[in-house]
Amino acid sequence: MQLETEPTAPQQNTSPSLSQPGAKRGLLFVLSAPSGTGKDTVINALRAQGMDFHVVASVTTRAPRPGESEGNPYYFVSKETFDHMLTHDELLEHANVHGNWYGQPLQPIRDNLNAGRDVLLKIDVQGAATVRKKLPGATFIFLVPGSVEELVTRLNIRQTETESEVRRRLMDAQNELAQRDHYDYIIVNRQGQLQEAVERLRAIILAEHCRTHPRYVNI
C-alpha cells in the first residue's frame, strides 16, 4: 500500500474554495453519519460544484466491495500493515467498526493543512470522539437521514450488506444518532433533497472561514 496525497499547491482559479484568501492554514472538518445516510454523495456533490478541499481516504482492514478500488474510498491494508502504522504513530485515530479496523493517516492531513487547504475527515462517532479529544479546534458536523424509514430504504437499495448486516447497521445507527449533541452542526439529508444538504454543508464551511479567529489545528 502506498498512500498518496493530492497536489497541495494552492489552485489559481476563480472557483469557490474552502481555503479563503489570507488564511495561513487550512481548516479541519470532521463529518460523521450513520451508514447509508449519504455522506459520500453530499461530499462529492459539493466538490463537483467547485469547492476545493482534501477528503482523507481512511485505511481499513476490510475487503473491498464491488466498485471500490485502492484509495477510493479507502486504502485496503492487511492487519499487519495496520498494526505497523499504529505502532509508528502514523494514524490520527483508529477504531474497530463492524468488525474491521479503520484509521485516519496523519501525513496527508498534515500536508494539506500546512499548504492552506481544508481537510475533511469522514469518520464514525467513535473516531470523531477521539479526534475531538486530540484536536478540539476541528469543526464537527453530523449528517442525519430524514427518517429511520429513509435509512432502511437506502441500505436496502445499495445491496452491499446481508439482511443481518443491515439489521446491525440500523442498531448502530440508533446509537450513533444519540451522539448528535456532541457535534457543532447537524445537517439533515432528506430523500430527494440532496441539494439542500449540500448547501448547508457549504454554508457551514464558509461560516467557519468567516470567524474573527478561525479555528486552526496543529498536528
Image: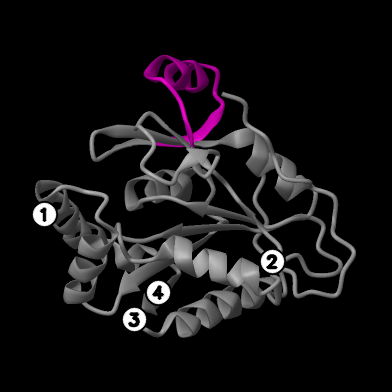
- Three-letter code, disc 4: Ile
- Three-letter code, disc 3: Arg
Q: Which of the labelled discs sits on residue 113, or is there none?
A: none
Sequence order check, earlier mark of 1 and 2: 1
Residue 178: tell me if it is visible. Answer: no
Q: Which of the labelled discs sits on residue 190, or is there none?
A: 3
Real-space Cα separation, disc 3 to disc 2, in angstroms: 30 Å
Q: Is residue 80 magenta?
A: yes
Residue 131 vs 143, above or below: the answer is above
Label 1 Cα neighbours within 10 Å, binned few <14 / some 14-19 / many ≥20? some
Real-space Cα separation, disc 1 to disc 2, in angstroms: 41 Å
Q: Are marks 4 and 3 in contact (CB under 8 Å)?
A: no
Q: Which of the labelled discs sits on residue 167, or is there none?
A: 1
Sequence order check, earlier mark of 3 and 1: 1
Q: Secondary structure at mark 3?
A: loop
Residue 199: tell me if it is visible. Answer: yes
Q: Residue at x 28, y 79 (%)?
A: 146
